[in-house]
Image (cartoon, rainbow, N blue to C red):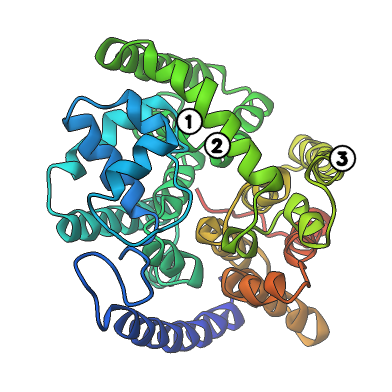
Amino acid sequence: MSRHHKIFLRVLAILSALYLLAFFQFIGDSISGIDGIALATGNPAGGDFINLYSVGRMVLEGEAVAAYFPEQLMQFQRSLIEDPIGLRLWAYPPHSLLFVWPFGGLSYFVALALWSALGLAVLGLGARRMGFGWLETILIMVSPASLQCIYFGQTGNFAAGALMLALSARKQTDALAIGATALLTIKAQFGFLLPVYWALEKQWRLIALVSVATLALFGLTFAVFGPEVWRAYFEVTVPALSQLESSGTGAFMQMIPSTFMAFRILGWEGGTAMQFHLAFAALVFVMLVYRLAKSSNKSQKLALILFSIGLITPYLHVYDLSLLVAGVFVILRALPAQTGFRAVGIYGFALLGWILPHALFGLNSGGWPLGPLIMFALFLWVWSTKAFEEQSIE
């Protein structure tokens, strides 16, 4: 990494420290006047964590199938918080139940603290195993995307860390990478490009072992919870989730940077918006596969994968975008030192990837859904850049 890049990281460290202080102040203001698990606003502490906690409790009480019926889930949540907290559903497939039930056996705030720490730990482990230094790792862990994930009690940090663990597979029998990839099937919008990447790299054994691990998770879920959870998931939850994303309204629209949501914010009907999104996603996918096949530089390949996920999937959220920061750091490590306008461009792009998870709220709510354009600019920057050093992170 060049001297200029190191200076930039120090500047980013200062910005991160200021953002972290503002985040702590925001948290302090949010928990003032807290009543039980309800904030003064009426929202549950930890945001969407109430879904994970409720499902964990329901599994322990033998009500796993009921977790996939939104009304029954919300009825259970009303025993935890009296204030109306809007439509709630458990969007993750049934093998997620194998991992959430321990949190239901703890008190709410202990479970929330443990979940937040686990997400940060997996994110940090993924960053370190991908080859990032301690400063880069810490900056990823305190980035706006990571902190948003903690505030909303979401899975983004865990998923981004698992993705980096998968991408940093050291051999085709790497147990950590195989396990991480199998777990990513719980949040498939993160891991769907891994088979494509590994197929182009001819890592067939890795694909086979991941398939076996995933099937083992499915089989264990079937053995523990039976077929009814799968039927409820596909017949009730999936249609409800699709309906919510295609025609629902609310604060969640401010949190999605996809082309699909950009068109919805601009007033387009959900079906038409999805058609345009799929056409754009197909273009990005073709460009990605072409460059993955042609490039011999691992850093370029990894950054392209990290940047393209948010362009292809329609349902990524702000708290999932730590992968943008990771992609930026991959490129900063690989690119030679730059000066003049080129240096301004590189560091400008880097800042865009860092700040987008925070800026998206204002852009989308203001009717300026520029998230996909910013992410596509990052993608094009890496796709068209050929001045990579031979060394790349391993």
Q: Residue at x 38, y 75 (%)?
A: 41
Q: Residue at x 69, y 50 (%)?
A: 304
Residue designated by label 3? 279
Whichever of labels 2 and 1 marks the residue nearer the N terminus, that label is 1
Marks 1 and 3, Cα distance to the nearest angstrom? 24 Å
- Badge 1 vs badge 3, beta-carbon distance below 8 Å: no
Q: Residue at x 87, y 44 (%)?
A: 276
Whichever of labels 2 and 3 marks the residue nearer the N terminus, that label is 2
State whether residue 190 is above or below residue 39. Answer: above
- Do we see residue 100 in this rendering? yes
Point out residue 382 in the picture as x, y percentages from the top left corner.
Answer: 75, 58
Label 1 element class: helix
Residue designated by label 2? 191
What is the quadrant of residue 134 in the picture? bottom left
Front residue of this view, candidates 311 and 238 = 238
Specify few, some or many for label 3: CA neighbours under 10 Å numbering under 14, 14-19, or 20 or more. Answer: few
Marks 2 and 3, Cα distance to the nearest angstrom? 20 Å
Front residue of this view, candidates 114 and 227 = 227
* Residue type at the position of mark 1: Thr
Marks 2 and 1, Cα distance to the nearest angstrom? 7 Å
Specify few, some or many for label 1: CA neighbours under 10 Å numbering under 14, 14-19, or 20 or more. Answer: some
Residue designated by label 1? 185
- Badge 2 vs badge 1, beta-carbon distance below 8 Å: yes
Q: Residue at x 23, y 49 (%)?
A: 79
Q: Which mark is residue 138?
A: none
Q: Quadrant of the N terminus?
A: bottom right
Point out residue 72 in the picture as x, y percentages from the top left corner.
Answer: 36, 35
What is the quadrant of residue 68 in the picture? top left
Whichever of labels 1 and 3 marks the residue nearer the N terminus, that label is 1
* Residue type at the position of mark 3: Ala
